[in-house]
Image: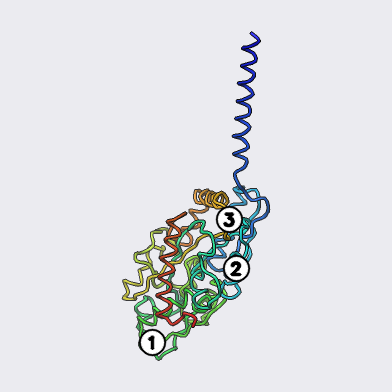
Amino acid sequence: MRIKTFALNRLLAALGMTAAFLGSSSAMAWEPSKPVEFVVPAGTGGGADQMARFLQGVIAKHKLMNQPLVVVNKSGGAGAEGFLEIKGAKGEAHKIIITLSNLFTTPLATAVPFNWRDLTPVSMLALDEFVLWVNADSPYKTAKEYVDAIKAGPDNKFKMAGTGSKQEDQIITVMLQKAAGKKITFIPFKGGGDVAVQLVGKHVDSTVNNPIEAEAHWRGGKLRALCVMDAKPLPYKKKVTAQQAWSDIPTCQSAGIDAEYVMLRGIFMPPGVSPEQVDFYVNLFKKVRELPEWKEFMEKGAFNQTFMTGKDYADWVARNEALHVRLMKEAGFIAK
């Protein structure tokens, strides 16, 4: 009896040690131990800023992580300030950055010593669309009417507001110039929010803002959407204005304008972080994507809801970089 009791005690002790080991292994899964700085390499009010602040709020609301996300705008040098900070924070897993096309355009246009390969890819959250907008009081009801008016006028008569210089908005403006055969005056501003306000105030003739940057003004009857710069119409059929849903906006291609462009909304971390640390953020954003608030945000901003991680994400970024090299060479935007 004593032998059996001794054997049983040894078995129970072994099971206890196994349970303790499994519990400690689970506890060892990495998670932030201090506030996480969420860098936006652009100004306030633009698409990247709005998405970052939405993520900050919804993650806090649903307690998806124990530490807060702290959004910090670092737009200096067309976003170089933000990217260089993340590049220099090797091994620091308490910093993440949301990207836009300046991930490619800024180093190409300025020769700043930075490339996306200096960072650690985490996940593509979505792809952002571009829409050609005019003021609601503009005489142009269609994209063709607007481009025809540019064709009929002298060079630089029409003014386009956009975010930054030699970035995505100006790249698209060059596409429109090619379609019209006339130069368009491009006026840069710090962020998409400022750009939309300029058009509402009739200080410029058009913008190519992301949907989320212009949605409130469109809904309020201040702006008119002429065409979307994607290969097919947007899928969202719920009415935004009294007459139109996102799906009602025709493609620019259908108006004879060769302008197709979508933009990354993705997350990167500094170099030198561990796979476990990357996995934490991948899983965090997967949880966000399951929330009803995320689905509402995606529809409000008419996003393409493609999600990628790992090699698929890195391969997509590499292909998009090559596209930007070509587009910026054609536009003459590459730093000498």
Between marks 2 and 1 in the image, the one whose residue lies nearer the viewer: 2
Query: Quick check: 279 left or right of 32?
Result: left
Residue picked out by circle 1 = 182
Any part of residue 44 in sight = no
**Residue 77 in the image: x percent, y percent?**
58, 76
Disc 1 residue crowd, few under 14, some 14–19, many 20+, Cα 10 Å: many
C-alpha span from label 3 to label 1: 48 Å
Q: Looking at the picture, does residue 123 appear above or below residue 45? A: above
Tag 3: Cα neighbours inside 10 Å, few (<14), some, or many (≥20)? some
Q: Which mark is residue 134?
A: none
- Mark 2: secondary structure: helix
- Calculate the distance from the C-alpha at mark 2 to the C-alpha at mark 3: 18 Å
Task: Give the residue type at disc 3.
Answer: Val
Where residue 229 sits, quadrant-wise, is: bottom left
Q: Which mark is residue 82?
A: 2
| Amino acid marked by disc 2 | Gly
The residue at the far bottom in this view is 154
Q: Residue 223: horizontal and vertical position, in percent?
A: 47, 73
Residue receiving disc 3: 273
Which amino acid, mark 1? Answer: Lys
